[in-house]
Image (tube, rainbow, N blue to C red):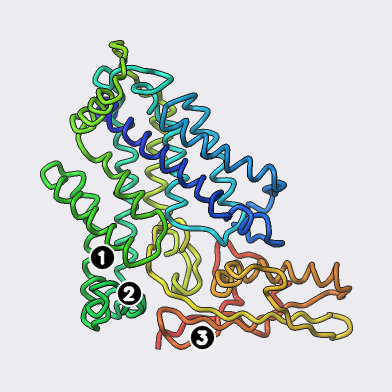
């Protein structure tokens, strides 16, 4: 435990704070400027929820817009170190709330943003080179655990992303890379090459090896600069070839925390000189409170175990998706789904076929069609809707769901004879109404 208390320069935390704060501000403003707040959070009449979050209230439109403006301001506050604890706490609370409003918009990198926001709220990344504490970074020391926690989080993210790729679809069939690369024939200059049949297996093997090893190479000082070069090349390539949002840029920017304190001190000193900033010479050495030690160690232990929970369930995790989220299973699936719901009046036998788009937007329907927990939620919604709005008595909901996984012919996902209105969400077991995946 003594190694965790060793005083280290705060400089890497300062860099992470500034980088993350600017990304957080940009991410929030992007949602506003692109009209996504209205399109994805205000217009839909139904929202899918993560298990256990149905109690979250839905804010009115004005309050929801205010939430995003508050997130943007909080991101800027994080970067500047202004009212830092308040800014970081506000961003973490608002961002997490927004992401829990509709499961449709879950992305691995949004989960990572929430985790980093939580860490920065806990860590004293404002105790130098900030509006709260305008002190020279070379004079402020923090416990080593404060630096190692975000570093190890990135190692775990990469490692579990690589571990998830050690399966036949990725390594043997090179799927879904084979599908995605085959669609890039019109890519400038390299289009014809990207469509070659021998290229996806090479990309697949390199991707798995990269994810499994890059975190450890970043930790090792002798290989760090070469590893970071590969980080830049890898993420620039994925950003150019595939639409995966901010993830590549987030990783390229934030993994600079692996560099030495001296590297960060030089960068910050140059920045201070350019803007002619006068910094205090007050010396600070922060101690590691027992509560923070146990919280950060528990946080890392949880992040090391939680992605493995899919092994507790029978069946193919890529098919039934229990344990798929929050496990860094990145770029593993290409799914296409078809979901036709039928609602039957339990007393009269009257039957209605459901047009999903009468209740959902296009993105919601697309995402729901192959995710079992979302299909079940929508079935419950339909049962309630047809009872309250259409006058059905004891409505029964049946589903014909066909899903194609990684280019295979479509298979039936749900037992069409089961009344989903009577089924409950299964948190600790595989749902009986899900049909098994047939690989061939």
The mark closer to the camera, 3 or 2, is 2
> Residue 29's x, y, as percent?
51, 45
Mark 1 vs mark 2: which is more N-terminal? 2
Q: Which residue is mark 2?
A: 177
Whether residue 1 can be seen here: no
Residue at the disc numbered 1: 207
Is residue 359 found left or right of 305 in the rendered image?
right
Q: Residue at x 36, y 50 (%)?
A: 304
Residue 92 appears at what percent x and percent y? 51, 39
**Callout 3: helix, strand or loop?**
strand
Q: Gap between marks 3 and 2, in whole Å?
A: 21 Å
Q: Is residue 13 above or below residue 50?
A: above
Q: Which quadrant of the structure image shows residue 337?
A: bottom right
Helix, strand or loop at label 2? It is helix
Q: Is residue 268 left or right of residue 24?
A: left
Callout 1: SS: helix
Characterize the local packing of mark 1: few (<14), some (14-19) or many (20 or more) Cα atoms within 10 angstroms: some
């Amino acid at each position: 435990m003594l190694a965790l208390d060793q005083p280290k320069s705060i400089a890497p935390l300062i860099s992470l704070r500034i980088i993350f704060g600017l990304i957080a501000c940009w991410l929030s403003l992007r949602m506003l400027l692109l009209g996504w707040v209205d399109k994805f959070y205000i217009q839909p009449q139904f929202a899918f929820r993560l298990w256990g979050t149905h109690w979250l209230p839905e804010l009115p439109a004005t309050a929801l817009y205010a939430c995003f403006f508050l997130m943007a301001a909080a991101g800027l506050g994080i970067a500047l170190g202004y009212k830092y604890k308040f800014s970081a706490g506000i961003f973490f609370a608002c961002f997490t709330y927004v992401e829990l409003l509709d499961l449709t918009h879950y992305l691995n990198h949004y989960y990572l943003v929430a985790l980093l926001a939580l860490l920065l709220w806990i860590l004293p990344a404002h105790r130098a080179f900030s509006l709260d504490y305008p002190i020279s970074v070379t004079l402020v020391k923090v416990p080593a655990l404060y630096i190692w926690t975000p570093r190890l989080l990135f190692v775990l993210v990469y490692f579990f992303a690589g571990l998830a790729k050690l399966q036949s679809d990725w390594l043997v069939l090179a799927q879904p890379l084979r599908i995605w690369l085959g669609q890039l024939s019109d890519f400038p200059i390299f289009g014809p090459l990207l469509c070659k049949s021998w290229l996806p297996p090479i990309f697949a093997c390199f991707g798995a090896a990269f994810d499994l090893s890059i975190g450890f190479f970043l930790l090792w000082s002798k290989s760090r600069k070469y590893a970071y070069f590969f980080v830049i090349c890898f993420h620039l390539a994925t950003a150019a070839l595939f639409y995966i949002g901010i993830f590549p840029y987030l990783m390229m920017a934030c993994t600079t925390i692996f560099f030495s304190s001296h590297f960060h001190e030089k960068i910050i000193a140059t920045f201070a000189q350019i803007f002619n900033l006068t910094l205090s010479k007050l010396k600070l050495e922060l101690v590691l409170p027992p509560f923070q030690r146990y919280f950060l160690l528990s946080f890392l232990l949880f992040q090391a175990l939680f992605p493995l929970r899919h092994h507790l369930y029978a069946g193919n995790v890529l098919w039934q998706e229990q344990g798929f989220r929050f496990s860094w299973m990145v770029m593993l699936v290409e799914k296409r789904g078809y979901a036709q719901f039928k609602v039957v009046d339990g007393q009269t036998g009257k039957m209605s076929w459901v047009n999903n788009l009468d209740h959902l937007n296009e993105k919601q329907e697309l995402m729901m069609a192959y995710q079992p927990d979302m299909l079940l939620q929508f079935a419950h919604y339909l049962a309630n809707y047809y009872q309250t709005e259409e006058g059905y008595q004891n409505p029964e909901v049946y589903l014909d769901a066909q899903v194609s996984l990684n280019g295979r012919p479509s298979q039936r996902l749900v037992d069409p004879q089961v009344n989903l209105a009577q089924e409950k969400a299964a948190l600790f077991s595989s749902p009986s109404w899900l049909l098994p995946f047939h690989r061939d």
